[in-house]
Image (spheres, rainbow, N blue to C red):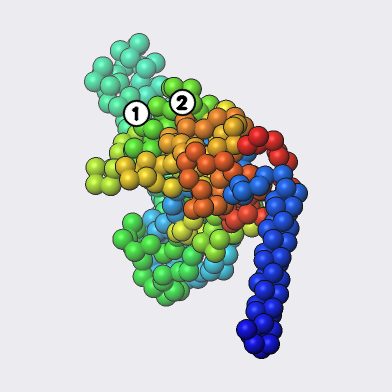
Amino acid sequence: MTFSNRLLRQRFFILTGAVAASLLLAACDGQEQAAGRGMPGKQEVSVVTLHPQSVAITAELPGRTAASLTAEVRPQVGGIIQSRLYKEGGEVEAGQALYQIDKAPYQAAYDSAAAALQKAEATVPSARAKAERYRELIKQSAVSKQELDDAEASLMQAIAEVASAKSGLATAKINLDYTTIRAQISGRIDKSSLTPGALVTAGQETALTTIRALDPIYVDVTQSSTNLLNLRQAIANGRIKFSGDNVSVKVVLDNGETYPYAGKMEFFEANIDQTTGTFVLRAEFPNPDRLLLPGMFVRAKVEEGVAENSFLVPQRAVSRNTKGEATAMVVAADGKVQQRVLTVRNSVGNNWLVDAGVGDGDKVIVEGTQLVRVGQDVSTVEVTIDETTGEVKSRKPVADAAVGK
């Protein structure tokens, strides 16, 4: 063997020994690091520990606002509008003058009725005196019975004419007062459909304007009949504790903001719409700032009751199996992964309200489910879920190193 061949063989053995030593050191370091974690060879997953709690059951329903009172203003007598006495779009009080109709013909009718009453009243004393005189004369047989009857009939007729004249005067007074059109309710008034100089008639089809009471204001929401039946069945079975007559309602505006005042449920309709299978619930809200206006689209959050001893499972931890059942991966007390079939009632924020399938202390896997299988030993890290976004917002150190021992 030549000198060059021996030199090449020596270099080969030296390189081979260096590579082997490096691999051996790396393996030792990996074992030491794994031993430092206390759980060599186990997949780490993020979990949320479940505990029973009382959960407020709310339903978010679409709805629209409606004025608590609405009055369309129409004339009750005919005539020419002389003036408009209110500011369009402003607030008016009940009894406030809104329009003035030309009162001249109605004033004349009132004066005529007053004169007719005076005339009728003037005939009464004479008729009464005659009737009284004949009553005395009949005792002396100075007048006949027929003459007495005629005198008493004349008195009664005079009294009746006075009553009729009084009624005519009252009617004339009412019509005269109607020439000033007044607000029947307090609220915000719309623009006027007619201007001064327009001719109006009693009870015309076209309203002069509309007044709407905005404080309080109503919110009408629709609920399906199926949800109503499910709610009543849950209350009957004791799964939900009914919150009582004063059901609280909150409103989310069209821009996503929450209305600052809470409302209360007033009533729900006693019939189901045959076309849509829904019924209407009405809630009443204070509206001192007039932020809510009739016809606005809102989302109403109705507190239906409280589900006691219930579990909230993060939605990110729940999936569906081939049968369409809701399932979740759970780390049991022995540290092994189990797949649970859940009975899901409804969503609460970014969680599912679960009736069955989990228990107190179960650790539901929220991260790492794709990396584990049923029956596998795993190590866990407790995490906190952001209730607003449903994302993991914080992690805790491994608190249960004994899991899996």
Give amino acid for label 1.
Met
Q: Which of 268 and 216 is in front in this view?
A: 268
Q: In this view, does 230 lie above or below 74?
A: above
Residue wearing tag 1? 156
Residue 2 visible from this viewpoint:
yes
Could you say which disc has been placed on residue 390 in the image? none
Q: In this view, does 333 lie above or below 290?
A: above
Q: Where is residue 148 in the image (x, y as percent from the top left)?
A: 30, 21
Q: Which residue is drawn at 37% across and 41% down?
A: 325
**Mark closest to the chain's N terminus, 2 or 1:** 1
Residue wearing tag 2? 235
Residue 156 found in image quarter? top left
Residue 2 found in image quarter? bottom right
Q: Which of 39 and 255 is in front in this view?
A: 39
Q: Position of residue 3 (x, y in %)?
A: 68, 87
Q: Which residue is drawn at 70% across and 52% down?
A: 31
Q: In this view, does 325 lie above or below 360?
A: below
Position of the C terminus, as image quadrant, is: top right
**What is the crowding at mark 2: few (fewer than 14 residues within 10 Å), some, or many (at least 20)?**
some
**What is the crowding at mark 1: few (fewer than 14 residues within 10 Å), some, or many (at least 20)?**
some
Position of the N terminus, as image quadrant, is: bottom right
Q: Nearer the viewer, residue 26 or 71?
A: 26
Badge 1 element:
helix
The residue positioned farthest toward the front in the image shown: 1
Badge 2 element:
helix
Residue 247 visible from this viewpoint:
no
Q: Nearer the viewer, residue 343 or 16?
A: 16
Give amino acid for label 2.
Ile
